[in-house]
Every structure is written in C-alpha cells, then in structure tokens.
Amino acid sequence: MLYFSKLRVFSVLIFTLIISYFTISNFTKVDDEFFSKNIKLGLDLQGGSYLLLEIDNEPVITQRLQSKVLEFKKFFRDKDIKVRNFVIENKSIIFDVENSKIENVKSLLDEDKSEINPYFQQYKSHQFNFENIDTSFKLEFSDYGLVLLKNSSLDQAIETVRRRVDEVGTNEPNILKRGNDRILVELPGLDDPGRIKSLLGKTANLTFQFVTINQEESFGTEKIPFEDGSGETIVSKRIILSGDNLADAKPTMNSQTNETVVSFNLDRVGAKKFGKATSSGVGRTLAIVLDGKIISAPVIREPIVGGSGQISGDFTFQSATDLALLLRSGALPAPLNIIEERTVGPDLGKDSINAGIMSLIIGFFLVVAFMLYKYRFFGLIANLALISNLFLLVGILTLFEATLTLPGIAGIILTVGMAVDANVLIFERIKEELKNENNSIVAFDSGYTKSRTTILDANITTLIAAVILFFMGSGPIKGFSITLGVGILTTLFSVYFIARLITAYYVIKNKHKEKLI
Amino acid sequence: MKTIYFNKFYKSFNILSGILIIASLVFLVFKGLNFGVDFKGGTLIELRTDISSANITKIRDSFNQMNLGDISVKNFGNETDFVVKFEKQNSNDPQFIEEIKTKLSNSIGKVDFRRVENVGPKVSAELLRSGVIAIALSLAAMLLYIWIRFEWQFSLGAILALFHDVIITLGVFSVFSLEINLSIVAAVLTIVGYSMNDTVVIFDRVRENLRKYADVKIFELTNISINETLSRTIITSVTTLLALLSIFIFGGEILKGFSLAMILGVIFGTYSSIYIANPVLVYLKVNQRTIVKEEKE
C-alpha cells in the first residue's frame, strides 16, 4: 500500500530525527546528559596500546598442590590414618596408605560430602580425580578443579593488573578477562607501552628470609642468587614476612647515604611479626628476596619494631618508583606473559581518521552522483534515503556507544555502496510493472511488494556474514561487522519507511504524469 | 533494452572459470599464501623517517644486523613510510622494541615508530584457526539459508559460485603475494555475503519466471532472468565498486589489501552469479516441475 497513516509518518519522522540527533551530538557539545554521547574510537584510530596477557598457571598449580599436601597430612592424622611418601610429580600428588585403610581412604576421597576432596555437591565434580593402585594413591586436579583454580588466579591477577595500570595513571584503561587464563589490557593514548609492560611482567613476590650460612635450620634451606649477579647465598625457607603484609611503599632518599631507597610501612600483623623476628635475630643477615632474587641483604643492627623500614639496592629513582608501585599493588599469583601486542601511535590514528573520512565523503558523492545520473528524480529519493541511512547508522552507533575502528569506517562506506541496492531493486521492478500497468499507483505498489522477498534475501545473506564476523572477529574487525550489520538494518528502515514515504507522496501527487520513473 | 545472449557463452566461460580455479588451487597449494604477522606470528613495525637518505636497502641492512630472523622491508604508501616485518617476536621483553629503535636511530638517524604489532605463535595459530572457522561457518550458514529458501539445484549453483569467488580471490592474493591478515578474512566474509546476494537476486527471478513461462527451456529462461535483472546487477556493482575504489584510493595503506580483496570479490561475484550459478541450473535441467514439486510438499 502506498498509503501511510499520519501516525506512521509522524513516528518515522520522530524516530529518524532523534537518532540523527545522536549523530550530530558527536560533532557538537550537547548539554543534555542523555544526548551527549559519543562514538568511541578504537585504538587504531585514537592511538594506544593493546596487550594480551596470559597467566602461566604452572607455579600456581604446584603451589596449590604443596598446600594441599599439608592439608592431607593434617586431615589423615586427625582421622588416625597413616599416610606417607608424599610426592608431587607431573601436577599430581602421590602418597601411600597402610593396607588396612585403603578402602577407608577411597571412600573419604570419593564421598559426595568429602571434606578433603570438595565441590561435588556444588558442581557434581570433585576437586581431584584419583587413581588407586595397591597402597598407592595418585591425585590429579579434575577439569573442574583446574577451572576453579584458574578462575581464582585470574581474578586475583586481574585485580593486581588493574591496580598497577591505575597507579601509572593512563587514560581510561580497559581491562577485561579473556577465557580463563588471559587478560586483555587496552590503553588508549599510550604510544610507548614499555613501562607498563615491564610493570606487568613482574610477579613482585617479596619475601624477607634469614641468610643461614653455617647455621642449623629446621625449615630447610635454599640457594638464592643475588639480583646484581654477584653469586648466590643460602637462606632459610622460613618466610618471616611477605609482600602481603605491606601497607604502603614509596621511593625516598636516604639522607645519610644519599641513596634512593624504597621505604615501606607494614600492617599491624606484619609489624608484629617483623618486630619479633628482628629482635631475636640481631646480628643476622636478612635477605630481601624479590621474584627469586635477593635485591639486598642488610645486617640487622637493632630490632625493628615500628613497622617501617627501607630497602636499598642500587636503585635509580625510576626503578625505586617502579618497585614501590609494584609492592603497593601487590603480587601477581603467577607470572604473566604478553602474547600479543599492538600499538598505534597517535599521529597514525589521526591519519587513519582523515583517510577514512576522506574516502567516505568521496565514496558518498560518487554514489550520489551516479544515482542522480541513473534515476534523476528517483535518484534524489534514493539519495535522501542514503543520507538518512548514514545519519541513522552513525546515530545508532553513538546511542550504543559502539567502538568505531578503521575497518568500521570501511564498513560504513561499503554500506553506502550497497544500500542503494534495495532502492535499485524496487525502482527497476516498478519500471517493469509500469510496462504492463497503466495505473501508476498500482504499478508502484506491486513494485514494492514483488521486490520484497528478493531484498530480504539479499540483505539476510550479508547480515549472516556480519553476525559470524561479529562473533569470530576481534578488535578492529569486530568494528567492521558492527557497522556492516547495523548498516543493513538502517538501510532497510530508510528504504521501507523513508524512501517509500517520499515515493508514495510523489506518485499520488503525479499519478497522471507520463513516464514517472 | 536489447537482449544480450549471455547463455551463448555459458560453456566457454565455464571452461575459463575452471581453468582459473585450477590455476588458483595450484598456486594456493604450491606457492601458498603470504600470511602477515596476524597469522604467522612475529613483529611488524611501521616507521616514518624524515631522513632523505633512508631507503629500503639501508633499513634492511640495519635490521639484518640485529639478528631478528627473516626480515621484509617495504615502502608503505609514501617514500618516508616503511613497513618492516620479521619473525622474531619477544613481547615479553619490555625493552625489545625500545632497543630496536635505539639501534635503528644509531645507524640511520631519527625514526618514528607509528605502529607496532607483536603476535606470539600461540595467538597467531588461534587467529588463523578462528579465521578459517569464520569462513567455513559463513559458507555453511549460506548453504543452510539457501537450502531453506530454494530447491537443491539452486543451492548447488549458488554455493559453487561462492567457492568460485573465494578461491579465485585467494588465488589472486597468492599469485601476487599480497598479504593475508585479519582484515582479509573480513573481506572474504563480505565477499561471501555479496556473491550470495547477487546470485539470490537472479535466482529469485528465475524461479518467478519458471512459474510464469511453462514452455520456455531453462537455457532461455536463465538468459531472460539475467537480462531482466541486468540493470540492477550493473547499478549495484557500480555503486559498490565506487565506494570500494574510494576506500582503495583514499582510505590509506592499511585498508589497501582489504579494499582490493573486496573489489576482486565484487567483480568475481557479479560474474559468477551470471556465469556459474545460472549454467548450473541448465546442467541440472531445472524446469517448472522442480519448483512445483517442492511447493506441493
């Protein structure tokens, strides 16, 4: 039907105007909060860094198994079951049980409400799968146990990453989880990610341990190298204090030695522990270990009870600042590897925007000129539809604050080229209908009706491609799929509501004219 | 408008297409594709320098001294811009890029890094896999759609046309060693959509005409349908190509490969809707019963 009700005309108009207003709000300052939205520019357009980090969970698994061994030992002792020969091997715990208790241990591990092998009631999967051969038991993380472990280490890591990035003070960073062992960090405006990378690359595990050369040690000892490469020394495995107990850290100048140092304050528990250890250890050497390397090893001259201290160690002001930052933001549960990095400088981004807009304008005018040449007055109608289509497309992208990327701009230009297709299909059909039909209103009407399935078919195929790209693509490509997909919807709207409205109005006014199209 | 006898050339163009597809496959198998860092892993640096003596040889020489594996240096758009690609990627070392920059500045002078991409082997393998899955998925989705909308003879024609377009476009990329990166995957998917779109428009008309003219042979009927939709086919191809040419010429170096792939795709897509999709209907002897039978069921 070429007839449009007043209400329909009115709502089409209002809808188009409101959405178009969002487009304009990108270029002007709008006071109203609802309308003052902007399209977000992707990193490829505004410049910035994209980093994909992957957690190396191996150390977390080993750590978790170690603490699980302690749990097992206590658990079985309480149950009066003798277990021995605990070994951690190939990400599994192996131990032996006395003959008479094998069935007992099995059921303890296997029951639904198992305390030592939990989660079954919640997730229908135990934390560990186990095998039993003779008296030997072998426990391995179940898939679910592993997922839970990875999730919790990812949660912890993402918090630390966020604190570190925030401390550096970049502009609106975007930090997101990807899968169960990856973190995506987007840093708009940052063209040299070197410092952030070096900050994210450190786990920043800080411990204080006594050096134990020539001394008996019940906790066992380990060899730890010095950071500056000057050999290694033997320290106790007993951790007096770790970075967790730090309340604050900042770089300062030691007025006596004129050295840059990192001074720290401990929380209450930490201060107590540190006071006790330093009181009993006057005269001993304290190793300050960061990520498996001794950064300094001062001799304790007097008990430190105030809960504050200093770390010295050949720092420049920059490295002291970084260390303080790392200590404040806490340790990562596991090392992070940067597996993908993309950085675009701000001037390349600007060039890309200019080139994108330039090609949009030129492409737009070429298409508009061609349509005018081909269809004259109806070309004008198609062009009006095209303009409103552009306004609607950009308006909707703004309304949803979508991210515009360089391929996204290409998607808009491509939409300009393909959007006229629907009107062309309709106009060509109307021309055919007019050959056999004298009543132009009927001809126009059936032109619209008969071309409808074809237009739907044609647009659905492109929409399918856009949807698949949206789900499979990443970053800039996603931006392309969004503009392409939204472009199809706005095209259909502009063709069936706007162009059709104008066409109908024109045809009804000029129904007796020869050669309408 | 005068009728053009497209159907006279069905056979000769099918032979030509056959040759092009075989040649493309030969190139794809033996020469392969020139994968960019997205899919191969490694490092890409786009740099700009205002030193007039800087040229490809000089830049390659100074990179060669840094022990970074296989290196490629190309001009990028204009004389002051270069793109350097090499195998080594070490994004974990925060100083990696910085050191390269320092060494380069020492040997040729001040350079500005406009873009750095560093993709690890795991990520590039995943990107490649998801790219292949995306293309396969889109082909499958098109197959499903066309299978629901049309009879199987039409589906086969449309899908053959699709494969034709994708294979030859990739073939051209192989012959000229043009880089395949993430945006090319996007282009291929859009080509798939466009090619299907174009074929569907003609097929819709073929089906309509099958109902209308009971006694016209499919050989004639496809030609009638192609002619009836011809002006639309031309206008849409032209406007789409105008938009794409505008991207190709004015859209900057980054979009060159993407727009080129699309331009090729649109040309092949338009051609294949006429010369692949329609002859298939002829070979499969589609007639009025083909669609009437479907509709009775």
Image (cartoon, coloured by chain):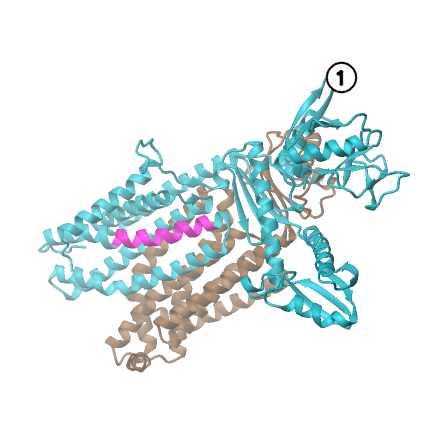
Chain colours: A cyan, B brown
User: Horizontally, is A348 left or right of A375 in the view?
Assistant: right
Q: Name the residue under label 1.
A: A256
- Where is B168 relative to A488, above or below? below
Which is the main secondary structure of the residues drawn in magenta?
Answer: helix
Name the residue furthest top: A256
Image spot of residue B123 (x, y percent): 61, 53
Work out whether residue A484 or residue A424 is closer to the camera in this orientation and state it: A484
Name the residue furthest right: A214
- Where is A499 relative to A159, above or below? below
- The kind of residue on which mark 1 rests is Gln
Work out whether residue A468 or residue A227 is closer to the camera in this orientation and state it: A227
Tell me, yes or no, whether the highlighted magenta stretch contains residue B220: no
Question: What is the quadrant of residue B290 in the picture?
Answer: bottom left
Tell me, yes or no, whether the highlighted magenta stretch contains residue A494: yes
Residue A365 seen by the camera: yes
Work out whether residue B107 or residue A203 is closer to the camera in this orientation and state it: A203
Which quadrant of the figure contains the N terminus of chain A?
bottom left
Work out whether residue B233 or residue A111 is closer to the camera in this orientation and state it: A111
User: Horizontally, is A300 left or right of B116 in the view?
Assistant: right
Callout 1: residue from which chain? A
Give the class, few, some or many, for how many residues have Cα within 10 Å of label 1's Cα (few <14, many ≥20). Answer: few
Image spot of residue B282 (x, y percent): 38, 77
The span picked out in magenta is A478-495
Image spot of residue B159 (x, y percent): 44, 69
Name the residue furthest left: A512
Residue at left offset 52%, top offset 46%: A176
Image spot of residue B277 (x, y percent): 40, 70
Question: What is the quadrant of residue A3 in the picture?
Answer: bottom left
Residue A510 seen by the camera: no
